[in-house]
Structures are given as C-alpha cells and as structure tokens.
C-alpha cells in the first residue's frame, strides 16, 4: 500500500519572509518535516524560532506582509502553496484545523459561543437549521463542557480561560478535520487547566483518528504528549527525532542545552546551564548560613479585600467596569515566617492571592487587616503612600515579573539602576554613584557597554539583569521575586536562576520567591508555602513537599506539571 | 506573533523619522506649508504689498489682477494683504488657546489618572460637564457671557479644548500608574510627585503632543467660526473668519474673491496642521495610525 | 429574566444622564450670572429705563443670595420660563420650539447622509490597507476635518447657485413661491409628502440639499476615520484569525465577525460627532439663512439678546445629553459585555 506510507502533511524546504521597512526578513528558513497519519508531532522552540510562522504558512493565514518565498507544502497530495483561495477555505476547518493561545480573545466577544460553532457547521455545509444547533450542543458536550445547552448561550467573557479553550477546540473539530494544529494551546493557562486541556486534545485525537501538531515552547509538555519532536531555533530546524531518541541522545548542542534548561522535579540549578558552561557540573552555590534566631519577616493574619469601598461613581464613563459590587477576599488570614538568609517559595495558580500578598509585604498595597513585621518592626500600619521615604524601604526590594514593563522606556540602563541609589543611597557625588552602578552591573554579569542603552535596545535576559541590579543596589535584606523568569525563554531562565542563586550566596539576602511553578521554586528555596484561593493549603520543607505532599491540591499541582523524560546523562548517573 | 514583532526591535528613532517622511511624502508638503504659515505670521505685516486697513473706494470690488492678486473688497482694500496679515492674529488665538488648554488639561488629567480616588472623581465630573455641551455652542455661550473680546475667544476655545487633553493625559497616566517601572520607582524611594514628574509625565508627553497638533486645526476652526458669527474680532481688523463672513454677502452677486481667498487660507492652514498631527502620530506611535 | 436585566440597565443609563443634565443647568446658570456688569441691564436691553431694569432684577431674583437665585432658576426652567427675547418680544421658549424642527431636519439629515457615506468608505479603506482607495479615503478624511463649514457652505453656494444655477437661492427652508406644508412632524420634506404634495416636498428637499451636504462633509471625516481604525483593529484581532483558520468565508468574517465588533467603538464616538454637528449646525444655518435655532441665536448674539442666547445654549445641551443617552442605551443593548462590567 503506497498511499498509507505517504505523509499526511509534508513540508519541504519552507522559507517564509516578511516585508519590513529594512527589507525582507526571513522568519523561517529551509524548514522540512512530515506529519504521518495518526501521529502527534511537536514543534518546539523559544521565541523568535519561527514555529508559529511555520504553522500560519501551512494554513495560508500569514499576515499581509508575510509570504512563502520558497518550498513545498502538501496535504495528502494537494499542493497547499498553489491551492486557490476557495480550495484553501475548504481545507481550513474541514481538513486542517487550528487552535491558538489566548483562547478568550480567540472567540468573537459579542457572539454566543454556540452560534460561533454553528457558523462553521453552516459554512462547510455539515449541518443546517435546527440540526446545526443540536450538533453545536453535541460538540460542546464532546469537549466535556458541563451543561452544554446552557453554555450554548454563553458569551466568551462569561467563561473561564480553560472553558474558552474547550470552545475553541469544539470549533476546530466541528467539521471533523483530519489534522489539528495546536499553537501554544495552554500558554497563559494554569498548570492544572493545562493538563486537562492537553488530555482532552489527546483523547479527542485518539477518538477521531486525528493527526496533531503541537507547537510549544515547553519541551516537557511536548515530550509528554508527542511521539516525535522537531526542535527549531531562529527559523531553522536544528533537530527532529522521536522523543526517546531526542532525550536519550540529542545530537545538536542547542537541543542538549534546551533539554538541560527545562526545569524538572529533581536536579540542581547549575545543571540547568548548557553542558558546555564550565559551571554545569559544579555543586550549587551555598547560601551564607546565619543563626536561625529571630525571624526576618513575620506575617500574621494578613488579609486583603477588594471592592469593599464602593464609591457610587461608577456612572462616570471612564470608571465603567472599574468597580465590583461584592467585596472579594483575595488574601484571607495569612500567616508565615521567613528567617534571615532563608529562601521561601510562595506557590499557587493564578488568582490564589500570591501576588497580592507580595504587594502587601512590599508595602505597595495596604492590607485590610493583619500585621507585617520586618526585623521586628511593624510596617503594615504605615500607609503605602508614605512608605517611600521610610528607612525600611531600602531593606525590602522587589524583582518584577515583566522585565520590559518594569523599566522606564526613557531611562538608560544605568539611570534605571542608579534610581534607588540616588533616592535612598547614602552615596555622595556622581562619581561614587557611577562606580556603584558599574559594580552592580559586574555583579549581575551585565557588560558595562550596555549601561548606556535604553530598554528597547536590550534583550529580555539583559533587561532582567538590569531589574535585578536595581533591586540589589541598596543591599536589601529581603528580596521578593515575583515570577522573575515567567516572561523569559527557558535558556535565559536557566541563566537568571543561576544568577539569583549566586547573588544570594554572595550577598546573604533572603528571598521570597513567588511563582506558579514548583519545579522552578524548588531550585532556590528551602521551604515552600502552597496557596489556593487566598489561604495556605500546605507548608513545609521543599524536599518534603515535592516528594511527599500532604494535601490533594499539592499532589494535583505536582502531577499537572509535565515532567520531561530523563536524559541519558541522568540515567547513567542513576546507575 | 511574538516571532514577527521580534524583528521590529532595534529601529533607531532617527531612521524611524526618515522612514515616516519618505514613506509618506505628504508630511514633507505639510512641513513646507507649516513654514509658509509661520513665515506669514511673523513677517506678514512687513511683506504685505498694501496697508490692510487702507480703504480706496475708487477701486472697490475689483477682481484679482496683477496689482491686487486676490482682488479688492467693497472698501477697496487689498484682499491679499489682509489675508497675509490675518495669519498672525488667527495663529495667535489658536496657539494661545491650545497652549492654555494643554497646560490645564495635562495637569488635571495626569493628576486624576495617577492619584485616582477623589481627584479623579472631581476632575472627571468637571470634564464630563464640559463635554455634556456641544462644544462650539458652549464656546458661544462663554463668549456671550464673558464679553465680546479676543481674549475671551481664547479662553472659550481653551475651555472647550481642555477635555481632550485631560482625557489623553488621564488615560496615559492611569495605564502607567500600575506599570512595573512606576512601582519600581516607588521601591526606589521616589515620592508620588517625583514619580509623576519624572516617570509618568515624560512618557505621557508624546501622545499629548500628538493630540495638541491634531487639536490645533480644530482650535483654529473654532476661533474662526466664532468670529464668523460676529464674536471677538471686530471689523476692520483683518481676520479670516470675519473676512469670510463679510465676503459672504457678495458671493451671490458673483464677487467670489472676497470670501474664497480668506476661506482657502483658513482651510489650508487647518489642513497643514492636521497633516502635521498625522505625521507626528506616525512618528510617536505607528500602531495608532488610522 | 434576561430582558428584565436589560431593562434595568437601560433605566440605569437614564439615571446616569441626570448628573450630566444637572451639570448643564449649573453651567448655564453660572453663564447667566457671569455677565460682565449688571446682568439685569443686559437682560433689559439697551432701550430699558431704570424702572424696567429694577423690574427685571426682581423678576430674575438678582437681588437675592446666589443659592436662592439658583432655586428660582430651577423653578423657571421647570415651568418652561426661559425669559423673553428682547429682539422679537416673544417668550424664548416659544421662539426655540418654533425653530427647533428646522434645525433637527437639517442635523439629522446630514448625520444620516454622512453615516451612509462614511461607514462604507471606512470599511473599504480598512479592507484595502495601503492601496489607492485607502490613501484616497485618508486624504478625504483629513481634508474633511479641515473644512471650515461656513466656508464650504459659501463655496457650494457660489458653485451650485451662482455659477451653475442648479440650486435654489440660499434663503431658508422653502422658496416664497410655496406655502409651508401643514406641520405634522415639523420636517418640511416629510410633512409635504404626508400632505400629498410632492412638488413642495421636492422644493423643500432642494433647499435642504446644500446645507445638508455642507454639514455632512464636515462629519464625514471623523466617522470614516473611526470606522477605518475600528475595522482594522477588529480585522487584526485573534478571533478573526480563528475564524479564518476555521475556513469561514470572507463575507461572513467581514460582516458578522469584523464589522459588528468594529461598530461598537464607532457608536461610542458618535457622541463626539454629534457635538461637532450641533456646533457646525449654527454656522451652516447662518450661511444658508436657515430658520433654525442656530441662526436665531446668532442674530440674538449680535443684538446682545442674552435670554435668547442662554435659552439656545441650554436647549442645545439638553438635546446633546439626550442624544448621548440614546447612544448609551443602544450600546448597552448591543454589547453583551456591558452586563459583566455592571
């Protein structure tokens, strides 16, 4: 049987260019891969790798300034590059479907979700009239949406992100396509939701005999759900292999670095670095031990309610949607301690109150109730607006989640770093400040020539370093890290995590590490606190929580985060 | 689409301006037009061929000729000289009005956006009340109440322009109030006022400058409209709006040049400012282009 | 149950218009008292003697404290007493009520005309970005906002009346040769048609056409610009990509997905457009000797007939508040997301 051995989708030497004002820019270069029937293929790469552009080219939905410059794309023998717009429209949705990240914005905000499914059924003449409606409800049922009759009438804003993604999947599978392309389908969703969505896609694929392409930045996720993985870097394919081969014997150094950089349930911070980094095999930096006497930070009964203070001015056009009717308890009677030199992880999914907690400790937000003591001094009573000039300000510093957003676009890197020194530092004279800024840049491995640059001229990793340098400029005793690597690529994350570990060993600070990812938090923290819906569900030594979690929620959290298969090196080490 | 936006990083600002100008040659025309207008406003009275106020009934209502490029009016005054000299007064009114409303709007708007709370509510109420009027009608009412003078035209035009700046400034400040770099500045020990002045305001300035240049044309139109209906400037002072109003009486009998030339001058001036505003917006934020 | 919620939201919107109305009344009150010198002198007019000024002062309550004056002012408004126009000798309210239909006919006609042209123009420009049609629309839009309405009106009169002779003389709503139709709606064109008099209807439409086009040219630009921008934004959004990837046809994507979403921001900016239109209306009425409230106010301004001017400002503001309320209600009914935001 010759036909069955033919791949369903074949991409050969694909090159995609975008017309920009600096002339054409190649986003994808000479990319080739096949998708076999029933297969699940992963395309993995960091930002700028061209993985999404490849799939857009395949679907014929590139932006207006993008075009396929070279190469062949076929779907079961049909030449996709030369297909007429009408043919392509029939193929899209009917033969090949696609789902995207940000499910909420992927749906028409002012049309009932049921009707959006019906639109597609009608377009492809799969069903008409009342039949289409029945089928739409059936589809909602099939993507495991409870009460589908009722949800048919829902608008996207009435559904959660995970629910919206289910609707998008229902849309994509409405006309029983043979290929599903999932472009970062779970980015931005919580890990537990990620797992249910990915499981759903896998189950539906098996039921309907779908072939799937999963496009993701997460090597661990791809390894868990795909048979074969294509690794892309800067628009080119660097390696393509079945999962066990890829992890067992990666051939390309980039693949190897990527595998090492992916956080796992075990392993050291140093091991995240690429194998050719001299620190790769070294033991982790040891934090300076201090006598565990009085706690550095004590949080007691900390509570924050939002929306309680209704002002009755919601009618102002620009205040529409600002106010909520009911008081909502984001953080509920939270208590914990942090000792000098210690590192504590604060872990939970979105909306669990972890960021609100860190903002309150940071004194950027006033708590509704409760106390925060730093070095024995009560600081929660000082209003956040007055705290800027308080002596304790310098002791408490913060590293922000988004390195771009946290730097003033009109300040140079040096000016950003010097800001706290100028305001709160005891240094006199421009020379001393300049010297200190350069010292800090050295400390975070930021090349001195980058100091005169503006944020938009720096890479994500460099911006993160500027933010860290600014945070440690005043030698704080407590540094709160709010998802400091969530906006970074894994390879950059590896470097930044190592930097944070080094800084802690050198400067003897305490960290409060806020994150959604236990696998990242455990690399830097001796103790973790797991939060859910504003309260602490579990607290304990990191190793104990990771290996023998006491609560079902922590177990679920751990089980949800995808664990890549062990590398060959790790297997050998175990033997 | 992170893959695509990555390419846009690293474009130098100066290249960006050159790009905007070459991609949209209309901007160059606008800059040239602006130069002419500024020249007329500064040197108009010096280069005008005739005294704009000198009457000569012997040559009244002459059509355009070599001696009188734009013809003469019912009192025999040279229309070209009057149009030229009027540029200064028209620009003076609108520039002062826009400057005044820019300062007031920017101050109350950014304070409202940054501090929120009561500051926001009170300024919001004031701005909303101004916006509850058709703005030109409000300007009429203000001039009628304050008295029929040029200064009051400026005040009225400024008041009806304030809401635009206040809204832009408020929106820009409100976005940045929660931005990471503002939070970081608080952590660095900056006071609220200092943050407003060094972090929030400089970043909100470009969109407000765009708003100013886009509003400039509208301010000129409003001021001219007010003098067209007989407010503010009085004859025989040369001013475009009043010249059109006077010329309107002659249009039905065919003496078109009295109204058309000052009207064209007004239109081209406003057009120039609108084009400049567009170009400025493209430079400041290409995505906002509509 | 859902329709009840909708009704409640509509009523809420009506309630939200009240503070704006109150603000309008306060400002007009302040404007009345802000008159330089003695307001009573102004309201009495130039020919008044000492006794009549005193009479006016007492009638206006100018000898009482400010808050009391305000209460009187409110009382006067409630009873429809806007004072007497010194130029015509009639109560201001009557004068305004008689002229309002003429202004409304002109304004609404112009708005409908410009919506009918501007929205398709904006959509065309947005669906062909960078193409000639886009550039043409851009130039028209920029030129449109640059046009002083009073100048466009005069230029149109010169071309279509003086040069070509296609248009009737710019002397109001109807030539003297015709009798005005029996008032039903107050709109001459519609009343004449209801009366079964197509000839008068044509004549009225002929008079209406030039001022309507003048006004429409001015409002065209902001609507077209906004439509283009909103349409471009809608077309660039994620749900359009989803719709494309699902193979929906261009027509469905354009109309059902992009256009409907794009109309929401356009509706909200219509308020601003109304503001411009009502202002420009005054100038156009003056140019075409249109017997509406705008030209009444301009004439009153010239002779310092303050009661008439205040009455006019108040009427226009109320009209505008009402129009904004209608926009708000329309928006509430169209956008399902409003519910979630309260």
Image (spheres, coloured by chain):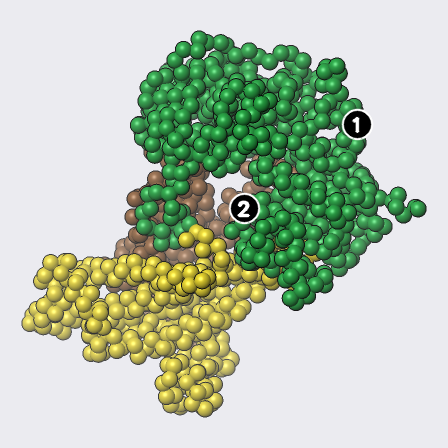
Chain colours: A green, B brown, C yellow
**Which residue is denoted by mark 1 in the rendering?**
A245
Q: Secondary structure at mark 1?
A: helix
Find residue A160 and name its label: 2
Residue C321 location (% of width, % of height): 35, 63
Q: Earlier in the sequence, mark 1 or mark 2?
A: 2
Q: Secondary structure at mark 2?
A: loop
Seen in the picture, residue B221 relative to A545 is either above or below; the reply is below
Question: Which residue: 40% across, 20% down?
Answer: A297
Instruction: Name the side, left or right, on which B124 lies relative to A152.
Output: left
Question: Which residue: 58% across, 47% down?
Answer: A163
Q: Quadrant of the C terminus of chain A?
A: top right
Residue A507 location (% of width, % of height): 48, 13
Furthest residue to the right? A1
Camera-side residue of A509 and A141: A141
Residue C298 location (% of width, % of height): 30, 70
Residue A460 location (% of width, % of height): 58, 30
Find residue B156 and name its label: none
């Amino acid at each position: 049987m010759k036909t069955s051995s033919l791949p369903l989708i074949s991409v050969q030497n694909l090159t995609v260019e975008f017309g920009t004002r600096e002339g054409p820019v190649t986003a994808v270069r000479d990319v080739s891969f096949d998708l076999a029937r029933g297969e699940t293929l992963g395309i993995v790469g960091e930002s700028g790798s061209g993985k999404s552009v490849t799939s857009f080219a395949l679907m014929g939905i590139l932006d207006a300034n993008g075009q396929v410059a070279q190469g062949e794309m076929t779907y079961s023998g049909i030449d996709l590059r030369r297909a007429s717009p009408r043919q392509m429209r029939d193929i899209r949705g009917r033969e090949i479907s696609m789902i995207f990240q940000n499910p909420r914005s992927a749906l028409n905000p002012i049309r009932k979700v049921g009707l959006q499914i019906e639109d597609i059924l009608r377009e492809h003449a799969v069903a008409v009239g009342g039949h289409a409606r029945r089928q739409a409800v059936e589809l909602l049922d099939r993507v495991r949406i409870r009460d589908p009759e009722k949800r048919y009438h829902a608008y996207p804003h009435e559904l959660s992100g995970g629910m919206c993604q289910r609707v998008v999947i229902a849309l994509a599978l409405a006309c029983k396509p043979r290929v599903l392309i999932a472009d970062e389908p779970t980015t931005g969703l919580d890990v537990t939701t990620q797992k249910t969505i990915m499981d759903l896609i896998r189950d539906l694929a098996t039921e309907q005999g779908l072939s799937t392409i999963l496009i993701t930045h997460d090597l661990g996720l791809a390894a868990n759900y795909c048979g074969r993985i294509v690794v892309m870097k800067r628009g080119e394919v660097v390696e393509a292999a079945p999962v066990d081969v890829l992890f067992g014997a990666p051939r390309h150094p980039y693949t190897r670095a990527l595998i090492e950089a992916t956080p796992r349930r075990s392993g050291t911070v140093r091991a995240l670095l690429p194998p050719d980094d001299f620190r790769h095999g070294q033991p982790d930096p040891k934090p300076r031990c201090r006598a565990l006497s009085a706690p550095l930070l004590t949080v007691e009964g900390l509570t924050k309610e939002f929306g309680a203070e209704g002002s009755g001015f919601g009618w102002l056009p620009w205040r529409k949607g600002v106010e909520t009717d009911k008081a909502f308890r984001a953080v509920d009677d939270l208590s914990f301690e942090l000792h000098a030199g210690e590192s504590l992880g604060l872990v939970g999914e979105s909306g669990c109150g972890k960021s609100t907690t860190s903002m309150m400790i940071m004194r950027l937000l006033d708590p509704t109730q409760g106390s925060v003591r730093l070095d024995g001094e009560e600081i929660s009573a000082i209003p956040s607006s007055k705290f800027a000039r308080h002596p304790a300000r310098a002791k408490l510093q913060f590293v922000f989640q988004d390195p771009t957003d946290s730097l003033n676009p009109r300040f140079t890197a040096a000016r950003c770093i010097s800001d706290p020194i100028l305001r709160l530092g005891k240094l006199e004279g421009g020379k001393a400040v300049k010297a200190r800024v350069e010292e800090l840049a050295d400390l975070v491995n930021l090349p001195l020539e980058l100091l005169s640059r503006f944020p938009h001229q720096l890479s994500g990793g460099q911006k993160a370093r500027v933010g860290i340098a600014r945070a440690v400029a005043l030698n704080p005793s407590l540094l709160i890290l709010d998802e400091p690597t969530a906006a970074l690529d894994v390879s950059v994350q590896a470097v930044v995590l190592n930097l944070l570990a080094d800084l802690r060993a050198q400067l003897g600070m305490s960290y409060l590490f806020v994150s959604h990812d236990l696998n990242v938090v455990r690399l830097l923290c001796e103790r973790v606190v797991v939060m859910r819906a504003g309260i602490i569900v579990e607290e304990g030594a990191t190793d104990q929580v990771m290996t023998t979690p006491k609560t079902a929620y922590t177990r679920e959290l751990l089980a949800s985060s995808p664990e890549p298969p062990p590398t060959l090196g790790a297997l050998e080490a175990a033997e | 689409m992170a893959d695509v936006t990555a390419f846009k990083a690293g474009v130098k600002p100066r290249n960006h301006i050159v790009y905007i100008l070459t991609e949209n040659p209309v901007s160059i025309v606008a800059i040239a037009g602006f130069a002419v207008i500024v020249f007329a406003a500064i040197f108009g009275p010096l280069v005008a061929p005739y005294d704009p106020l000198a009457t000569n009934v012997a040559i009244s209502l002459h059509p355009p000729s070599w001696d009188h490029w734009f013809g003469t009016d019912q009192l025999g005054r040279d229309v070209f000289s009057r149009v030229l000299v009027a540029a200064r007064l028209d620009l003076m009114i609108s520039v002062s009005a826009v400057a005044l409303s820019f300062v007031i709007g920017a101050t109350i708007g950014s304070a409202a956006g940054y501090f929120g709370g009561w500051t926001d509510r009170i300024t919001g109420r004031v701005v909303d009340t101004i916006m509850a009027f058709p703005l030109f009608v409000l300007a009429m009412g203000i001039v009628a109440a304050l008295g029929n003078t040029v200064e009051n035209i400026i005040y009225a035009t400024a008041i009806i322009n304030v809401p635009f700046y206040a809204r832009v400034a408020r929106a820009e400040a409100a976005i940045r109030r929660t931005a990471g770099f503002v939070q970081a500045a608080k952590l660095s020990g900056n006071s609220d006022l200092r943050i407003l002045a060094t972090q929030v305001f400089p970043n909100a300035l470009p969109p407000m400058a765009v708003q100013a240049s886009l509003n400039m044309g509208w301010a000129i139109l409003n001021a001219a409209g007010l003098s067209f209906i007989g407010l503010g400037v009085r004859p025989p002072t040369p001013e475009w709006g009043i010249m059109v109003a006077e010329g309107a009486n002659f249009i039905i009998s065919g003496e078109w040049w009295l109204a058309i030339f000052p009207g064209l001058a007004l239109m081209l001036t406003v057009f120039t400012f609108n084009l400049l505003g567009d170009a400025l917006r493209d430079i400041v934020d290409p995505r906002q282009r509509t | 149950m859902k329709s009840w919620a909708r009704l409640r939201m509509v009523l809420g919107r009506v309630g939200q218009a009240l503070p704006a109305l109150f603000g309008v009344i306060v400002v007009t009150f302040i404007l009345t008292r802000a008159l330089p010198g003695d307001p009573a002198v102004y309201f009495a007019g130039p020919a008044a003697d000492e006794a009549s000024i005193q009479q006016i002062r007492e009638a206006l309550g100018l000898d009482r404290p400010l808050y009391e004056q305000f209460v009187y002012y409110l009382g006067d408004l409630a009873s429809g007493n806007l004072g007497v126009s010194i130029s015509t000798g009639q109560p201001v309210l009557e004068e305004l009520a008689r002229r309002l239909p003429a202004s409304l006919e002109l304004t609404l006609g112009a708005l409908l005309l410009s919506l009918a042209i501007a929205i398709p123009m904006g959509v065309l420009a947005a669906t062909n970005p960078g193409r000639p049609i886009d550039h043409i629309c851009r130039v028209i839009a920029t030129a449109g906002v640059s046009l002083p309405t009073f100048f466009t009106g005069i230029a149109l009169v010169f071309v279509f009346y003086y040069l070509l002779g296609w248009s009737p003389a710019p002397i109001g709503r109807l030539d003297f040769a015709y009798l005005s139709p029996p008032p039903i709606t107050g709109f001459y064109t519609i009343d004449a048609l209801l009366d079964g008099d197509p000839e008068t209807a044509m004549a009225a439409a002929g008079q209406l056409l030039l001022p309507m086009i003048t006004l429409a040219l001015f409002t065209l630009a902001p609507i077209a610009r906004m439509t283009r921008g909103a349409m471009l934004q809608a077309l660039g959004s994620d749900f359009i990509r989803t719709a494309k990837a699902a193979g929906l046809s261009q027509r469905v994507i354009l109309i059902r997905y992009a256009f409907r979403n794009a109309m929401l921001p356009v509706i909200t900016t219509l308020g601003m457009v109304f503001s411009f239109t009502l202002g420009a209306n005054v100038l156009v009425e003056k140019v075409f000797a249109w017997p509406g409230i705008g030209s009444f106010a301009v004439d009153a301004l010239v002779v310092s007939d303050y009661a008439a001017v205040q009455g006019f400002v108040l009427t226009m503001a109320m009209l505008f508040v009402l129009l904004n309320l209608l926009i708000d209600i329309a928006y509430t009914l169209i956008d399902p997301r409003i519910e979630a935001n309260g």
